[in-house]
Amino acid sequence: MSDTKIGIVIFDKFTDVDLWLMWDLLNRVRVEGWQVRILGASETHISQTGMPVSPQGRLEEASEMDAVLFVSGPGTRDRIADEEWLSKFDLNPGRQFIGSICSGSLILAKLGLLAGCKATTYPTAKTLLESFGVDVVEQPFVASGNVATAGGCLAQQYLVGWVIENLAGGDWRDIVLKSIQPVGEGLFFDDVEKLQKLYAPAAKSAGK
Amino acid sequence: MSDTKIGIVIFDKFTDVDLWLMWDLLNRVRVEGWQVRILGASETHISQTGMPVSPQGRLEEASEMDAVLFVSGPGTRDRIADEEWLSKFDLNPGRQFIGSICSGSLILAKLGLLAGCKATTYPTAKTLLESFGVDVVEQPFVASGNVATAGGCLAQQYLVGWVIENLAGGDWRDIVLKSIQPVGEGLFFDDVEKLQKLYAPAAKSAGK
């Protein structure tokens, strides 16, 4: 069975939690060959709060991934004005799942992936996203075929759930999302045995 | 007006999102003198997923903070067995807010801060926490005076909300927590003006 590769694209001035929530959730899947990599253009990118993160791969690798997710933050405004940066991507929703959280949708729009689609974004990016001709709707998650947008940091749950369901199956989606809910509000002390699945070595197959 | 200092304590094998969600939320408060620092025992700590983070201060600084929050992860089991590490803390709920997410509660218990209290934790840490004589309840957040525990990663919202409300006021708590909700589910496009408060320079006072 071939590997399943997921890339998360970061850049300077990204919103910290918009990387780390999806990174942590995606890394809870224990399926053989499941790989999650942070992709960037520099040896180090600095988050909105000033924290450095070293990408594990180059932007060019995104074209080989099964899923590519774009983070958000003030830095998206610089990215959509940087033609050289944008030229690194050769994404294809015919063979990849492609998504964004919050203002990451601006990058999808600039790459031509939201043409004629409904999409969502962070409130502060709505007007700019509309300027690309996108029909921006007030929903946490919008999937149009293999391209999806999510708005509001915690809507990463919908975005990551969509990726996991498609690449590892609904059972993995359910247990991964359950594992971060507040105790008594979606996660319960009786769930302790179900949670063991997240700590076991990778299973033999994705169980799609 | 004196500074308001908040320390987040990390260690090896911490759960990534249990640092970064609280870090990101706490850094959204724009109050003059508001300082958030990651504290650790080494130049670099490695998360459960293998990501390095460099602390900004030493564990000994925790005793000078207005609030001290402990992250979670498999690493907590090593920490509660490490007397030298534990000896670095001189915490006092009489003058500090002290809290934990998930299995960080084990450290609070080991430091004697949960004696005779109700508390919550992650399902996989419940039995061990009970072995310290703690009354573990199936709730997302439990505050007993100035000591609070939260269980389930997303219950960081309650924990951080409690710290922000006490140190910066309820208005800051409300807008910070609103800012990460999914669009259409707590955060709305009409909130765009309210969100500007999070991007403005620090205000002159905490507005308690």
Image (cartoon, coloured by chain):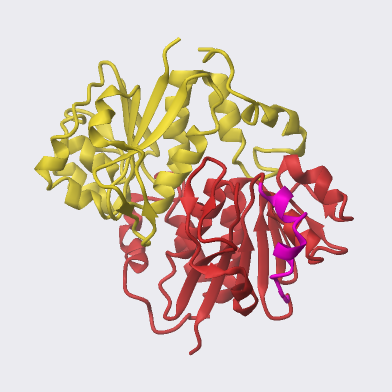
Chain colours: A yellow, B red
Who's the residue at 36% across and 64% down the image?
Answer: B194
Residue B190, magenta (yes or no): no
The quadrant of the image that shows the N terminus of chain A is top left
Between residues B24 and B195, which one lies in front from this camera angle? B24
Q: Position of residue B161 (x, y in %)?
A: 57, 62
Q: Which residues are magenta?
A: B75-92
Who's the residue at 37% across and 65% down the image?
Answer: B198
Between residues B177 and A42, which one lies in front from this camera angle? A42
Horizontal placement of A135 versus B52: left or right? left
Q: Is residue B192 above or below residue A126?
A: below
Q: Position of residue A25 (x, y in %)?
A: 51, 36
Between residues A21 and A201, which one lies in front from this camera angle? A201
Q: Position of residue A42 (x, y in %)?
A: 25, 47
Q: Is residue B122 above or below residue B112?
A: above
Q: Position of residue B144 (x, y in %)?
A: 76, 66
Horizontal placement of A168 versus A71: left or right? right
Evaluate whether residue A86 shows in this view: yes
Who's the residue at 61% across and 72% down the image?
Answer: B67
Quarter holding residue A175: top right
Who's the residue at 13% across and 35% down the image?
Answer: A87
Quarter holding residue B199: bottom left
